[in-house]
Image: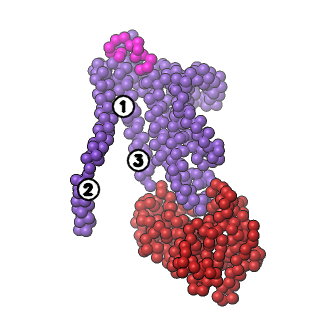
Chain colours: A purple, B red
Amino acid sequence: MQESDIKISEEISTKEIRSKRKPGDIFFENLTLLFALLLIGLVLFIAIEIYGDSAESIEHFGFSFIFSSDWNPVTEKFGALAFIYGTIVSSILALLISLPVSIGVAVFLSEIVHKSVRTPVSFLVEILAAIPSIIYGFWGIYVLAPFMASTVQPALSSLFGFLPLFQGPIFGTGMLTASLILAIMITPIISSITRDVLKAIPVSQREAAYALGATRWEAIKMALLNARSGILGGAVLGLGRAIGETMAVTMVIGNKAQIKASLFEPAYSMASVIANEFAEASGSLHISSLIEIGLLLFGVTFIVNTFARILIYSVTRKT
Amino acid sequence: MENDTIITDTIDDSEDIHDSGKHDTADTKTALRTINLSVKFFDKLAIKNINIRVKKNNVAAIIGPSGCGKSTFLRSINLMHDLTPGAKVYGDIYVHNEHITDNNVVDLRKKVGMVFQKPNPFPTMSIYDNVAAGLKLNGIRNKSLFDETVEKNLTYTGLWDEVKDRLKSPAISLSGGQQQRLCIARTIAVKPEIILMDEPTSALDPVSTSKIEELIINFKKHYTIIIVTHNMQQAGRISDYTAFFYLGKLVEYSRTRRLFTNPREKLTEEYVTGKFG
């Protein structure tokens, strides 16, 4: 009974407060609401527009568009599976490469290095995020790909050649090189978020660990455990960036619509095929198919983000 | 540095804790002893030549106005200043006749536990895991030992009946007072010899405060406790000896009863009677 009394009196008091608000407050509240709605409206508008423009291809191919990896503008046969595969595999591989490196960089910057070194190194890491992707692409073609072809891929194939992942012809460009470029591009994002999350852990938490007799490494492990939801959040942001990245990937992935087990083989990504073919697409079905790939990219991004959010939620909720 | 050793005396001479300024290795009654302990933060001297001796199974309270160096002194005992940039510690510390150096800091902190001003349970861990955290750090992986330790220490801190049905829920779901008792359980789970407490009740309500004071009095059987408090009544209620710090110096260190009723120093008298502070 008492509880409900309190609730009622709370309701009354919020109502009273609401009725006494000044016009300026009401105006400001509605203004922010308008901005928020504008953003949601924009997303919906883009989705509807892309859907409308891809109607021809959706009608023509139906679901086979997603499950077919045939892509032939001459015979007007279009299927997006190879691109979906290329985007998802290159992005996830990039995340797998980048995550440990990013966490290492973040731990180094927030826990280990002296202040006088921390600031310049942090600055350099953040500069990496500001380099235009076309520059990464150039670097990928002229530096990374030859290096991969001459050193990394031969080494991998001689060490792990029994795995299908590391078999096949060595071109330098291909899925692995694209993933590496992507990994380099998303490392500054993930590491700076991880560093901020680690730095936000209160001193009292660190002291609690040290006071129990934790070594430095154990205290850092506890801090990482503490920061895991933030680190995963950073990983999601990085993954989102990797999925949508166009230019650098286009330049090194090899641009061949195929699904191969080997990471040395050239592949193709959704964003790359749109960038490469849109300007020269001839028939309306070709254009419509490219737009449908855009729609699917939209969907893949959405699904990956949702999945990642659920993952974060389930990890953090357990405690 | 000038050496102003504080002469400490007691009401009964048989329990004399007079400080001779020299370390006596055969002494088995002393839990903690500091000789000319000073701490500098960058160029600023925070505490200066502190000589103190705390007997085993006693509660020693440290009082004094804000900024007098109480916490600085406390945190130098388990070498917490290692974590503070710019902090330097001078002088000697002996814990149970063992000279403290930076080399065995991890072992030291297992022997000298610490409870902080604000309850700081590990937020991503459950109640159970918080109590077991220290054991895990010691490399123990024995589930039944965990269960036993958790139950024993939560019972000891009076939390068991309150939380036994939700040991797996997050530690931060507890109230502030419960969190602080959880932190105490976590501290004693690693079986320390000395417990340092840095204003452990200043963030808590009166009921939780009295529960923790009760714990401290019971703890005397097993541990030596050094507690910093800004609450003189608290010092009077729970401690055997009280040290009065002022401007980074130890002004007086006497039996609690004496310090509050018949202090040797005029400054102490003025502080405990509320003339300044």
Residue B221 appearing in the image: no
Labels 3 and 1 in the same subunit: yes
Residue, x 77% and y 75% (percent of image)? B22
**Position in image of residue A279 (x %, y %):** 41, 14
* On-image quarter of the C terminus of chain A: bottom left
Image-quadrant location for residue A257: top left
Dot 1 amino acid type: Gly
Q: Residues within 10 Å of mark 1 (few under 14, many from 20)?
A: few
Residue, x 65% and y 64% (percent of image)? B46
Labels 2 and 1 in the same subunit: yes
Q: Residues within 10 Å of mark 2 (few under 14, many from 20)?
A: few
Label 2 resides on the chain identified as A
Residue A282 belongs to the span the image colors magenta: yes
Dot 2 amino acid type: Ile
Outermost residue, front side: B275
Front residue of B171/B13: it is B13
Q: Secondary structure at mark 3?
A: helix
Dot 3 amino acid type: Tyr
Residue range highlighted in magenta = A274-287
Which residue is identified by label 1?
A299
Residue A218 belongs to the span the image colors magenta: no
* Earlier sequence position, callout 2 versus callout 1: 2
Which residue is identified by label 3?
A313
Disc 3 from disc 1: Cα separation: 21 Å
